[in-house]
Image (spheres, rainbow, N blue to C red):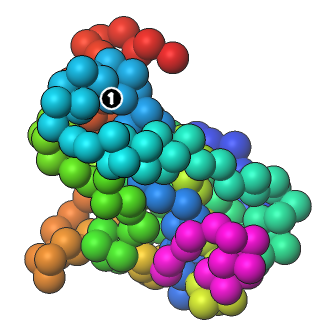
């Protein structure tokens, strides 16, 4: 594995034995852009109540500063931006030359965002997430509890491992993480992102 050049965050510790935690939910920023670009299509398909929940989910902020993340036990983190959680996993593990195992079904997601992804054939794990953060922590359970006390949805999704294998599981099937692909939002916006 070739190391990825990235700026460390927190205490710059990402090591075997630590756990991977996701704070926030995936696909929020992408779902917000879909709502902007495809509102008429969504209005024809979903109820007003559903669209209000989608808008609320897409606009939800976490308010997690570096100091708050560190207080919650984060030793390193990666914002889930361009390319979604899969790109964040690739970048942070590549920055430290460590492997990991992660269960994608444990990644927090809002049902409304999943339904929009299904409608437009978007992979929510490759969709920009806005305020969603991938965290390395010595105790994932402690970090999740601390984040939940701040009203932030969080879950332990995996563990950092010796070696360089980047393993991901979904529905009981384990494979290896591929290089990041273009963000799924480009299926909606084309090549130019309208932010």
Could you tell me which secondary element the residue under label 1 belongs to?
helix
How many marks on residues? Answer: 1
- Which residue is located at x 51 percent, y 46 percent? 56
* Residue 152 within the magenta-colored segment of the rendering: yes
- Which residue is located at x 77 percent, y 65 percent? 69
Q: Which residue is mark 1?
A: 34
Depth check, front residue: 20 or 108: 108
Residue 65 location in percent, x, y? 81, 54
User: Left or right of 57: which side holds 121?
Assistant: left
Q: Quadrant of residue 116?
A: top left
- Which residue is located at x 42 percent, y 79 percent? 158
Residue 43 location in percent, x, y? 24, 30
Depth check, front residue: 168 or 13: 168
User: Left or right of 148: which side holds 164?
Assistant: left
Q: How busy is the neighbourhood of tag 1: few (under 14 within 10 Å), some, or many (20 plus)?
A: many
Image vertical order of residue 51 relative to residue 137, above or below: above
Residue 170 location in percent, x, y? 19, 72
Depth check, front residue: 138 or 115: 115
Residue furthest toward the top?
192
Magenta span of residues: 144-156
Residue 141 location in percent, x, y? 60, 90
Image vertical order of residue 77 relative to residue 152, above or below: above
- Which residue is located at x 48 percent, y 50 percent? 57
Q: Quadrant of residue 121?
A: top left
User: Left or right of 128: which side holds 69?
Assistant: right
Tell me if residue 4 can be seen.
no
Task: For the N terminus, give its image quadrant.
Answer: bottom left
* Residue 87 within the magenta-colored segment of the rendering: no
Tell me if residue 26 can be seen.
yes
Image vertical order of residue 144 relative to residue 23, above or below: below
């Amino acid at each position: 594995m070739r190391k990825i050049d990235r700026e460390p965050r927190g205490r710059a510790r990402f090591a075997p034995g630590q756990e991977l935690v996701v704070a926030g939910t995936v696909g929020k920023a992408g779902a917000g852009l879909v709502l902007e670009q495809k509102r008429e299509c969504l209005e024809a398909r979903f109820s007003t109540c559903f669209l209000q929940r989608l808008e609320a989910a897409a606009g939800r902020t976490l308010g997690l500063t570096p100091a708050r993340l560190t207080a919650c036990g984060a030793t390193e983190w990666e914002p889930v931006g361009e390319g979604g959680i899969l790109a964040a996993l690739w970048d942070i593990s590549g920055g430290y030359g460590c492997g990991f195992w992660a269960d994608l079904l444990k990644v927090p997601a809002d049902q409304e965002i999943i339904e929009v992804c299904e409608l437009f054939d978007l992979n929510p794990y490759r969709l920009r997430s806005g305020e969603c953060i991938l965290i390395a922590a010595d105790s994932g359970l402690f970090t999740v509890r601390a984040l939940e006390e701040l009203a932030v949805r969080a879950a332990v999704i995996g563990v950092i491992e010796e070696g360089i294998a980047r393993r991901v599981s979904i529905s009981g099937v384990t494979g290896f993480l591929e290089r990041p692909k273009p963000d799924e939002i480009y299926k909606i916006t084309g090549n130019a992102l309208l932010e």
